[in-house]
Structure formats: structure tokens, C-alpha cells
Amino acid sequence: MPQRKGLMPTRTHRVVIPLAALAAVLPLLWHGPSCGHDFDFHVLSWLEAASQLAHFSYPRWAYTPAWNAGEPRFLFYPPLSWMLGALLGLGLPWHLVPAAFTWIALTLSGFSMHRLVRRYAGGPAALVAAVLYLANPYMLFTAYERTAYGELLAAAWMPLLFQAALAARIDVAELALPVALLWLTNAPAGVMGCYALAFVTLARLLLPRADRHGGSVPAMGRLETGLRVFAAAVLGLALSCFYLIPAAIERRFVQTGMAVISGMRIADNTLFHHMPPSPDNAAHDVVLHKASVIAVGLLASIAAAVALARGARPEGRSESKVRALLPLVLLAGLIAFLLTPASLPVWAYTPELKFLQFPWRLMSLLAAILGVFASLAFERLKLAGWRSAALAAGLVAALIALAWPDFHQSCDVEDTVEARVALFHSNRGTDPTDEYTPVTADNDSIRHPPQQTDPPYWLVPASPDPAGDAINTPAPANVEPGPAPSSLALTLTTPEFLILNLRQFPDWQITLNGKPVTPCPEVRDDGLLTLALPAGSDTVHIAFRRTPDQTAGMAISGVAALIALGLWRRRAASPAFG
């Protein structure tokens, strides 16, 4: 029976998807934010970035971590998530920012999945698949349990990557965009996305041609497909070079190895692994068990969806669609293997893969694969009218009802958004991040609450042996703590050491009386910057300089942006051009 006009508008997804995302954040609006694993880190990043953006300064150094000694986190953490959080904080009350960020990330995820699956399924089935994706258990685990906001936002780009990678004719600009977005949102997502793209492309090139099985003939040759994917990957990486090049070159200046210590290593996080008994390891095992259950559920759901899709034959084309999506089936199988201890050699010897830390992060790919095959399976229901919207509403309600009680993390008084904002605006500083701590610094040596934290600066009389006790002299007691000033004028009667409550880092540009100077080569245990000052009037200026690698990255990204813009304009002028 033909569907009556008006019962199912073609753009219903534009209303249903944002409402489904709103349903997922209603618990956050009602009960307050979930203070998950990464909550403090992201809230502080947003506050730091908002403060600097308000002064028209692009953030590179975070000033309040390490109890005001600072760290270069903005050089190494991709910019899109902290930039979005900062902009939201400039326009909304801070206590609403986590919920607003989550709503935007989930809404974008739903729209991108809908865009992907509309190629394979009708509008009603695509709508339900999009809602399933934005509220799938791993997405809610990331939003509620982990509050890993960078990973949450990166989930919006995974469907765009698959859409462009599976196209009959690869569009270089269209594929380059999600590659760049993944890297600029979350580094582990960038690594996963590039490896997934390489695997899918290899599968496309090696699998038998579809026409041998009665399917459609590929629109381009295998060599051209490979070259276009390679060009798109290079262009996507080039677009993100303003972040990638400084992060890659300057990471030798920070303690990146702290990201893969015990409990954070691949070997400690395969499916249902158990750490040696201890209070910290018990908490680790609880989280890993939840992630493992979700992973098994996603894999089982993908298998069921593939089986249903093969059994359904809407318009007689389901079988050919499943064949065209065989690279995703193989990718799901590879991920299932990578979640097990048997895959540890792969993790150990594949470049950069160990920095994913948790193999179950690959569930962001599994969730997108499930969305694709779920759309084909939902076709079997022959949804029409508002039944798809009703099914989507029931699905999201059930998933949220199951996830919130198990994943929600209550906030201690000191961890609420209001408390973090008050701490940021105080002079006490905040905790350091181990993997962003300069290699010259030891976080165990820096003074922090409940002890007295360091003042902005202090002076120590010079001694013949600068490497001796003088340079390591602690700050005087009962002095008001705070961050180091960027400019300082002093009048000294004798030569002295100036010790600043600022971590030493190669990107600092320091001038003494108008002339560039370098810090003392003998570094304090806490890594604080130390200058030797002569007697007399001394004026010190400190600024975070733009290094050659940062300039090179910006230049490459600028050229890549012009190339991408040219490709997009040519594509718009000639739809046949790809």
C-alpha cells in the first residue's frame, strides 16, 4: 500500500536524531555531569583554552597544571575537542558545557551515520541505524563512564571515513576530510582511522571483482583506486600538519612513555584480562570487564545483522550490498582478533599502535560497522510512516536506561564543574598530566597541596657551583602561590638565580635586558626554569615562541587547504569529477 503523503517526511531524521541525542544527555542535565575517567582533564583544557582565546591567543601551553608550573598539552592534544569545549564555555554557563558537548557529538554522529547508510538502505531503516549508532553501548560508555570527550567527538567522523572509502569511485577531497578530522580530534582515532582505511582499501583491491558474482562493475580500476586513496590520505594528513608536525617532532621533549605504563598497556587490556590484585587494579578490571562485555555484544550484533541482511532481499539487491560491504566484515573479524592476547605481537611491532593503550578503543570502528549492517537488517522490517521514529525512540530509551545506572560516575565535591572552575580561577594550580610533563621535570619533586605550592618566582644567591644546593633551593615558606609572570623587572645588588614557577621547555623565548638568553643548563629536580641574573637592573620577558616545525606545519596545512578547496570547487562544478 502506498505511503500516505506527510506520514514520513524525507527529512524526519533532521528532527529525530537531535531529539535522540537530547534524550541521551537528559540524565546529565537532570543529575549533573558524569565525572568519568577523563573529566577533570577535559574540563581544565576547556577552561585554559577559553581563557587564552578570550585574550585572542591560540593555546599551546597550559599554565595551571603542575601547580602553576604548566605543561605543553595543547601542542600534543588535537585541537578540535578542546576548541569546541572552550567555545561552548565562552557562550554557556560552565556547568552546562559537558552536556552541550555530548549532545553535539552524539548529534553529529547520528547525522554522519545516516549519511553513510542511506547509500545502502531506505530512509526509515537508515534513521533507526543512525539512532542505534549515536546511542550504542560503546558510545554511552565513552560519554558516561569515561567522559573521553575527544574520542566521543571523533566517533562522528568514522562513518564519513567508511562512506568515502567504500565509494565506487574514490573522491580524494571527500576522503581526505574525515582523515584530517580524525587526527585533529583524537590521536588514537587518527591512528585507528588510517589503519582501518588501509585495510579496507587493501581488501577492495584483493577481493574478487563484484561483476564475477553478478554485482555491479566497479567504476574504476584497482590501480586508480589505490592511488586515489593514497592521495586522499596524504591530503588529509597534510591538512592536519599544523598539529601533527609539532606534535611528532616535539614529543621527544615530554614523557610520552608515561602513557603506556602498567595498566595502560595493550597487554593489560585485552578482553577480560585480570591485573594482579590491588585496589587500583581492581578498579581497572571493573572497567575492562564492562568494555569486554560491550565488545562481545557488538561483535555478536554485527554477526546477527550480517546474517539478517543476507536473508533479507529488499528490491532484490541485499546480497550484492553485503558483498560490496565484505571489507567491513573482514575488518570486524580483524578487530575481534586484535582484542585477544594472541594479537600482542601485532600491537608490539605495528608503528604507533601501542599508543592506543586500550585495544577496546577499536569498538569505535565496530560500532560504525554495526550501524551499516543494522540498516540492511532493519530493511527487513519494512518500516514506514512514523514506525521508524517510534522504533528509534524505543531503542534509544532502552539503551540509555541500561547504560546510565551502570556507567554513570558520581562527582566528588572537589570534582564538580563549579569546583574545577573555582580552582582554575584561584592561585593554587591543578594536577599535572604525566605524559605531557617535560622530560627535565619530575612530578614527585614539585611542591603541591596539601603542602605549600610554589610562589610565582623567588631569588637565590648565586654560588660558585650552580649545580649545587643553590639552584635546588626550595621557595621560601608562607609566600602566596601563583603562576610565573611573563615580564619581570628586578634590581639586584649581587648576582642571583631567578627561579620561576614555570616548567623548562625548549619553546620558551626568554630575553634578559632585551637580549635572548638560555636557562641554566643545570636543571632542578622539579624542572622549574632557572636564570642567572647579574647585579643591577634586570628586565626579564618570557613568551612561548613559534618554532620552525610549527611554522612548517601551518604552511603545509595552508597549501593543503587550498588544494582541497580547489578539488571541492571542481567537484561542485563537475559532479562527474572525483
Image: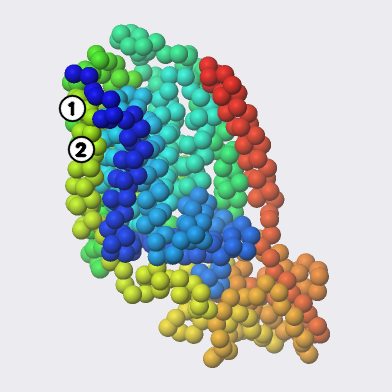
Answer above or below: position of 115 versus 577. Answer: below
Q: Determine which of the numbered discs, if any, sits on residue 391 in the image.
A: 2
Asked if disc 2 and disc 1 are in contact, CB closer than 8 Å, the reply is yes
- In screen coordinates, is 90 left or right of 316? right
Answer above or below: position of 332 versus 510. Answer: above
Answer above or below: position of 461 versus 149. Answer: below
Mark 2 / mark 1, whichever is N-terminal: 1
> Mark 1 = which residue?
381
For label 2, count other residues whose C-alpha is less than 10 Å away and answer few (under 14), some (14-19) or many (20+).
some
Give coordinates of residue 118: x percent, y percent.
Answer: 35, 27
Q: Is residue 258 visible?
A: no
Residue plotted at (40% across, 73% down): 419
For label 1, count other residues whose C-alpha is less than 10 Å away and answer few (under 14), some (14-19) or many (20+).
few
Q: Nearer the viewer, residue 452 or 441?
A: 452
Answer above or below: position of 505 versus 356. Answer: below
Residue plotted at (76% across, 69% down): 511
Instruction: Give SS at disc 2.
Output: helix
Give coordinates of residue 362: x percent, y percent.
Answer: 34, 42
